[in-house]
C-alpha cells in the first residue's frame, strides 16, 4: 500500500522536501500528493517546481477563522490523505480540522516537548539556558504543540548559539526524524492508543 501524504507548510519547506525525497527513495511507502500553505512561500515554489499539487489557502480570503478552517479541511480532504503532516505550518489548527483527520495528523515541533511549546521554541530554549533541545513529531490534539509523541531527537545547544544557527542544526536533525516518524506511522508500527503511542517491531 502506498500512503497518500499531504504536508502543510508556511515557509522554506525543507522538511517537506526531506519527506518527498524519502518517499522517492522508497524509504517510506508513501507519496507526497499535495503541499498546502497558508501563504505564498518558498516551499510552495519548490513543490510546484517538483510537479507536486499545491494549494495556497489564505485566512485573509475568508470572512472568519472558522470559514478558513472549514476551507482548509475541505482542501486537504479533497486529496484523500492517509497522513497529514504539519511541518512548519504557522497556524493553529481548529478542532473542526483536527477532528476530521484525527489519528492521521502529525506535527513537527522544534523542541523536546513538553518543553518550549509555541511559535518561538528555539529562541525560548536559548533564553532559558537549556543545554539540550531538539525536535518532536507528535499526533495533533486540540491543545497547541501537544499530543501523543511518535519520535524525538536531541540537539545540543552550544555556547553562543544564535537562534538561526541552532535552528539550522535542529532542521538537519528533523530531516531524518520526520521521515522516520512518518514511516513508523504509515507501516502501523506506531499506533495511537488513547493518549499514548504504542510501538511494535522496534522504533
Ligand atoms: C521546523 O523546524 C519545524 O520544526 C518548525 O518549523 C520549521 C520548518 O522548517 N515547526 P522548514 O519550513 O521545513 O524548512
Image: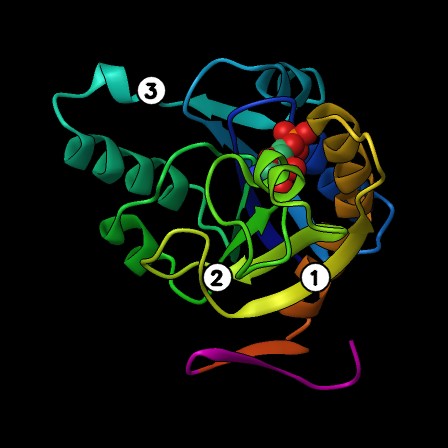
Mark 2 in CB contact with mark 3 (< 8 angstroms): no
Q: Position of residue 71 (x, y in %)?
A: 26, 33
> Splitting the image into four quadrants, where does ligand 1 fall?
top right
- Looking at the image, residue 133 sits to the left or right of residue 75; the answer is right
- SS category of the residue bearing label 3: loop
Residue beneath disc 3: 58
Give the Cα distance between marks 2 and 3: 23 Å
User: Per the image, is 198 magenta?
Assistant: yes
Q: Looking at the magenta stretch, what is its main secondary structure?
A: loop
Callout 1 crowding tier (Cα within 10 Å): few <14, some 14–19, many ≥20: many
Q: Position of residue 58 (x, y in %)?
A: 33, 20
- SS category of the residue bearing label 1: strand
Residue beneath disc 2: 104
Image height of 47 relative to 146, above or below: above
Residue beneath disc 1: 152
Callout 3 crowding tier (Cα within 10 Å): few <14, some 14–19, many ≥20: some
Of mark 2 and mark 3, the one earlier in the sequence is: 3
Residue stretch rendered in magenta on the structure? 194-203
Amino acid at each position: 500500500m502506498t500512503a497518500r501524504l499531504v504536508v502543510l507548510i508556511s515557509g522554506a519547506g525543507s522538511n517537506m522536501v526531506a519527506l518527498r525525497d524519502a518517499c522517492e527513495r522508497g524509504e517510506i511507502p508513501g507519496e507526497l500528493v499535495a503541499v498546502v500553505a497558508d501563504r505564498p512561500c518558498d516551499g510552495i515554489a519548490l513543490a510546484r517546481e517538483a510537479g507536486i499539487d499545491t494549494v495556497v489557502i489564505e485566512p485573509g480570503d475568508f470572512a472568519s477563522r472558522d470559514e478558513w478552517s472549514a476551507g482548509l479541511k475541505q482542501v486537504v480532504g479533497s486529496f484523500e490523505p492517509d497522513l497529514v503532516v504539519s511541518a512548519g505550518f504557522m497556524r493553529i489548527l481548529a478542532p473542526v480540522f483536527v477532528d476530521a483527520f484525527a489519528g492521521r495528523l502529525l506535527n513537527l515541533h522544534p523542541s523536546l516537548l513538553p518543553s518550549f511549546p509555541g511559535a518561538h521554541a528555539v529562541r525560548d530554549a536559548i533564553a532559558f539556558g537549556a543545554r539540550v533541545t531538539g525536535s518532536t513529531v507528535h499526533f495533533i490534539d486540540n491543545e497547541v504543540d501537544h499530543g501523543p509523541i511518535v519520535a524525538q531527537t536531541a540537539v545540543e545547544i552550544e555556547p553562543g548559539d544564535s537562534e538561526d544557527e541552532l535552528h539550522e542544526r535542529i532542521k538537519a536533525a528533523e530531516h531524518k526524524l520526520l521521515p522516520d516518524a512518518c514511516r513508523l506511522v504509515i507501516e502501523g508500527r506506531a499506533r495511537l492508543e488513547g493518549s499514548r503511542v504504542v510501538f511494535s517491531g522496534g522504533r
